Amino acid sequence: MIFDRLSLKGKTAIVSGAGGGGIGTATSLILAEAGANIVAIDIQADRVNDTEAKVKAMGRDCLGIVADIREKAEVERAMGQSVKKFGAVHCLANVAGGMQPGQWGPLETYGDDTFDQVISLNLRYVFLISQAVAKQMIEKGISGSIASVASVSGIAGAPYHGPYGAAKAGLMALTRTMAVEWGYYGIRVNALAPGAVKTPRAMAGNTVDLDERAKGIIPIGRACQPDEIAAGLLFLLSPMASAVSGHTLVVDGGATAKFSLSGQASRYAPQGQVREAPRP
Ligand SMILES: NC(=O)c1ccc[n+]([C@@H]2O[C@H](COP(=O)([O-])OP(=O)(O)OC[C@H]3O[C@@H](n4cnc5c(N)ncnc54)[C@H](O)[C@@H]3O)[C@@H](O)[C@H]2O)c1
């Protein structure tokens, strides 16, 4: 059956950055809906508790872990707790990342400490946690899958968020290398590059409504929702994507498909009307 190919029944999935009501929370819930037990990791205890409660309310088991995944010792502790609780880890969704409002700025005056912090949260930790999970998969003979959240900022220029774009571009490159090195163990590794997503963090950092701003820029006429990004991650982690590895799936409503000099998306719409794509 078609839904069997999306099923993660009996599997354990780690989600990093699982709290906050954004992409990590949506990913935890969709992976649980697909049948997986969840290890929900976040740096904020209240966020861990919230996601854990939501997953358990769906009838799945969930181990909430408060950890700073930028620290190798914390990653190893979380990995140990996960294996102790569930026996093995089959899937990893690397969602933690992003920029704080104070971390935006022009490169000519950008602080090197801030540069390192952004690289650490958006690239370095992905190496740390993917290494720990893959090592366990290789030792146990598990044909698992890993999917990490990149960004369209790693595909084009990233004005005023230079280290973020560089980190996400590095994440996509690392994904390809991990796919090549670990493919022989049956492990698939992919990335997903979202465009503008209406997460609580993104909305808090914007004075303009993301949907309003999207109208002239994004071909589908609106920003993406967290569950639309989570759906892409489920696809990449599930048997439905059994031959997909080393790939970056762009989920941006067509934003990066548009020729940059073409002006507003509405130019291509009949009578200049942009009809929003339906929401699920
Ligand atoms: N929101 C967007 O428009 C957008 C666009 C493109 C890419 N992304 C990417 O999607 C991912 C999720 O974005 P979001 O908007 O849902 O973010 P978010 O801030 O809502 O969620 C990230 C979660 O990660 C947690 N976290 C932060 N640092 C951590 C650490 N050191 N250890 C453990 N947990 C930590 C936070 O507490 C938070 O709950 C990020 O990687 C971001 O770069 C987001």
Image: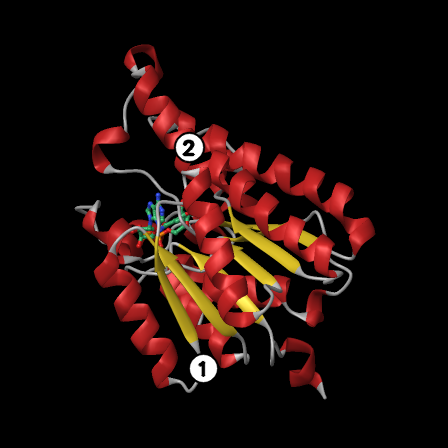
Mark 1 crowd level (few <14, some 14–19, many ≥20, 10 Å Cα):
some
Residue 69: percent from left, percent from top? 41, 45
Locate the N terminus by quadrant. bottom right
Comparing 63 with 108, the one in front is: 63
Extreme residue in the left direction? 207
Q: Please, is residue 6 above or below residue 103 in the view?
A: below
Residue drawn at point x = 32 percent, y = 38 percent: 99
Residue 214: percent from left, percent from top? 35, 52
Residue drawn at point x = 68 percent, y = 83 percent: 4
Write down the quadrant of residue 40 in the picture: bottom left
- Tag 1 residue: 60
- Tag 2 residue: 120
Give, as a three-letter code, the residue at label 1: Arg
Position of residue 264 in the picture relative to residue 7 (left or right): left
Position of residue 218 in the picture relative to residue 148 (left or right): left
SS at badge 1 = loop
| Separation of residues labelled 1 and 2 (CA atoms) | 32 Å
Q: How many marks?
A: 2
Residue 191: percent from left, percent from top? 59, 49
> Marks 1 and 2: CB-CB under 8 Å?
no
Write down the quadrant of residue 147 in the picture: bottom right
Residue 278: percent from left, percent from top? 43, 74
Position of residue 274 in the picture relative to residue 89 (left or right): left
Mark 2 crowd level (few <14, some 14–19, many ≥20, 10 Å Cα):
many
Q: Please, is residue 185 above or below residue 29 in the view?
A: above
Locate the C terminus by quadrant. bottom left
Pointer 1 or 2: first along the chain: 1
